[in-house]
Image (tube, grey):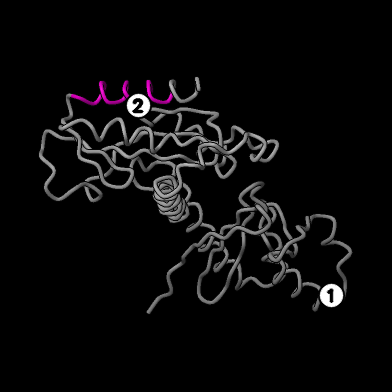
Amino acid sequence: MASTASTTQIVSNNETFTIGQYNGFEIIVCEKDGFINATKLVQIINEREHTNKQIKKIVQSIINHVRGTYVHKELLNIVCMKACVNYLHQVTKIMDKINETVIAEHEADKTQAVADQFHIVINTVTDTLSDRIIDLNQQVRQLAPSAVPNGKERTYILIVEEVNEDEQLEEQQEDHITIRIRRINRKDLHPAKLERYRRKSLLFVDNLPIAMTINEKIKETLSSRQDVKLWSTHYTFPEDQLNFIIDIIQATINTERAH
């Protein structure tokens, strides 16, 4: 059976890396600058020539647990051929898979990368737990502003987005729509992801205070409406009420900000 190239993502020291594998061979790509870990190939060259003087001229090192010898992607084929021609085929397969994954993520409208799905789950759980804590301890609202660390007073965004069909309630009527309200730390997002939320969300609100209990306020406001069903951070209602509901959410946020 032929091997299939695959990719995964990891984060180390606030750096994101894509790991590609094919036929037992593995390479690592730094997402920030696109440089590729060629440590294994360089080791082979050093063993053959008993020197690393020449290769040091084209490498870049990154100090973390994925440390090693990194080269620009345009130099990778040269390094492969110098080390072992057999590796050129394997590296090409892996790079094709990485490029295919990147293109698919950029072109997808409603599908997201595995890393994005992970953040969605974490943010949803965080919002749910935050709401529960507020229910159990209303005194949290009385915390002094000094309890918020300096520099982190306004680092959150709030987005309202339509959910996919597989996330909707089973009994949802055809003329109804389900939205999800999420509060995310903008420091956890790449600029491109932040801009995507800004363009594609039904509502995008920036610079929210870290201690702002906005989700609970929105839930209190919308739960009083008979045409709205809510579960966790999801709200289902007639589709023709969408603009009105968005206006209510925006007004609630504005009111909380003014306090």
Residue 61, percent from left and from top: 78, 58
Q: Main secondary structure of the magenta part?
A: helix
Residue 234, by quadrant, is top left
Q: Count every numbered label the image shows and give the total.
A: 2
Q: Quadrant of the N terminus?
A: bottom left
Label 2 – label 1 distance at C-alpha: 67 Å
Q: Is residue 169 left or right of residue 29?
A: left
Residue 255, by quadrant, is top left
Which-is-in-front pick, marks 2 and 1?
Answer: 2
Vertical relation: 51 (above or below) 207: below
The amino acid pointed to by label 1 is Glu
Q: Residue at x 21, y 38 (%)?
A: 236
Q: Is residue 159 left or right of residue 74?
A: left
Q: Is residue 98 left or right of residue 74?
A: left
Disc 2 residue crowd, few under 14, some 14–19, many 20+, Cα 10 Å: many
Q: Is residue 246 left or right of residue 48?
A: left
* Magenta region includes residue 96: no
For the question of whether residue 120 can be seen, the reply is no
Which residue is under mark 2? 249
Which residue is under mark 1? 49
Q: Secondary structure at mark 1?
A: helix
The amino acid pointed to by label 2 is Ile
Pick whichever, 115 or 230, lies toward us.
Answer: 230
Q: Residue at x 38, y 25 (%)?
A: 252
Q: Residue at x 24, y 42 (%)?
A: 230
Q: Secondary structure at mark 2?
A: helix
Residue 152, percent from left and from top: 64, 37
Disc 1 residue crowd, few under 14, some 14–19, many 20+, Cα 10 Å: few
> Which badge, 2 or 1, comes first in the chain's sequence?
1
Q: Which residues are magenta?
A: 241-253
